[in-house]
Amino acid sequence: MDIAFTSRGRYDLDFISIICSELNKAFDLELYPHVLHQIDGNEILTNDYSKTAHSILKSTKENTFQQDDFDSYVKVFSETKNAKKFANALSDLEDTIFYAQFKRDKPSLDLLERLLICLLGHKDVAVRDQAVILLNILYDGIDWQLKGAYRGRVSTVGNEFKMEQLLEDEPDEYSIGFLLYAYSFDGNNEDPILSWHKPEVYPFKDEEGQVSSHVVASVDFGCFPRAGFYDWKFVKFLKGGKVSSLYTGNVKAVEDRSSDNLSSSFLTQAANVKQESIETKAIHGRYIVHPKITKDLQIHEVFAENPEGIPGPIYRGSFHRIKETLPSFAKQGINCVYLMGALESDYKVEKDPVTKQEVINKKSGSNPMAVTDRTSVSTYLGGSNEFSDLMTVAKDKKIKIVLDYVARISSSRPNKRYRDLLVHTVDGEGRYLPAFGGEGRSVNYEDTIYLNYRYYLLF
């Protein structure tokens, strides 16, 4: 009888192999990870992956990244002009990121993030490109993008989630595996999980029903249970404790050019000659899954301060005015209103010269995109009470309200909670300055300042 251990996590294959290997030695058993089922020599593979796990543990203790390492890398990338040193340093950073993520070493990860963000401004385009890839790895938690960009696909909750891939037929076809990196299907886990799966592999038949030189690897998860990213990858289990990417590609003629800069150092250094090379792509990708209702939305954009698009003070927008237009939208088949400029911005309280009552007006020169507090709706447009009334009518008319959460805030009077989230830059004279917004086609954004994009959705 076969017994398989199953678990969830990035390093399960290696470390479950340790458990199986030790139990096999102690009790003369034949245990192995579940993804190695039906693979000839799975006992040998189990021992190989067990050794890999011990090697990772040993290397983890030896790999650190501290302030001295940060300063050393800054010196390499700012002072050297040697492309080979750049390439070696970037390769070392790949390993450092791997072990820092393995240990969940937050201080090291923070320093690595700072370094990679600095490299986004490097003079060499290849360094900048690689910094983007390494930042993606840092944020994603997996290193698949080192093997190439994802194939992007878009779907919605409830749609079929079945992966099929046509592969070259090989004697060890049953060594194929499938990896899925996504949030748990039951919705109880807030962190993404890497799960290992054994695909069904069967011969591929052509239109005449003849068996071809290919096989089909298939994994059926039913349907997408929740919105989010679903990263996937087909792999192959190899002797020696290695997991290899699977590739698809074709032969292509390319022209290599010799150059001293790093941008071309990844090519074969040949002198203006054409040669045949195999252009391959890793078989992996990302599903971007939207809520089920997304494909049924009829969206209408409304500029909150001027909802009718007609200039003049008598057409001044407010939540009350927008609320009164919702029944008309519903009759037109609109079931989603995208509301721009609805967050709190700069305003002032003044006395009306006629009524002597206090009124709320915009500050001179202020624009609705210069948000002062991203957690509150605009007082100038009616405040939370009027917005609550708007939402009541929207629910009654089955209209979704989407607020535009801009990635900028006011540079003159932002809420103090954003103090540590402001993006800064260095000018040509070395001065440390806030990264003020640019200008749009219809609105000046120079009175705004950028927020750190990694955090802005939380505030």
Image (cartoon, rainbow, N blue to C red):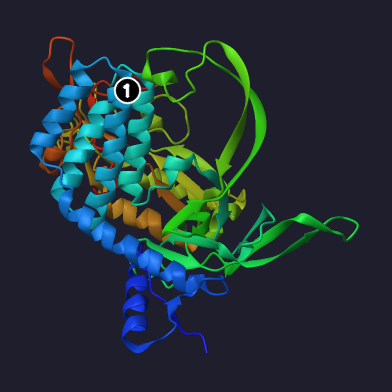
- Where is mark 1, residue-wise? 84
Q: Could you say whether the residue bearing mark 1 is in a helix, strand or loop?
A: helix
Q: In this view, does 259 lie to the left or right of 362?
A: right
Residue at 59% over, 13% down: 273
Q: Is residue 205 left or right of residue 30?
A: right
> Against 361, is 79 above or below?
above
> Against 192, is 450 above or below?
above
> Against 32, is 271 above or below?
above
Residue nearer the viewer, 247 or 452: 247
**Image location (x, y in percent) of residue 302:** 46, 39
Image quadrant in which you'd find residue 75: top left
Residue at 32% over, 19% down: 83
**Image location (x, y in percent) of residue 39:** 56, 70
Residue 229 can be seen, yes or no? no
- Amino acid type, mark 1: Lys
Image quadrant in which you'd find residue 342: top left
Residue nearer the viewer, 427 or 349: 427
**Image location (x, y in percent) of residue 59:** 22, 53
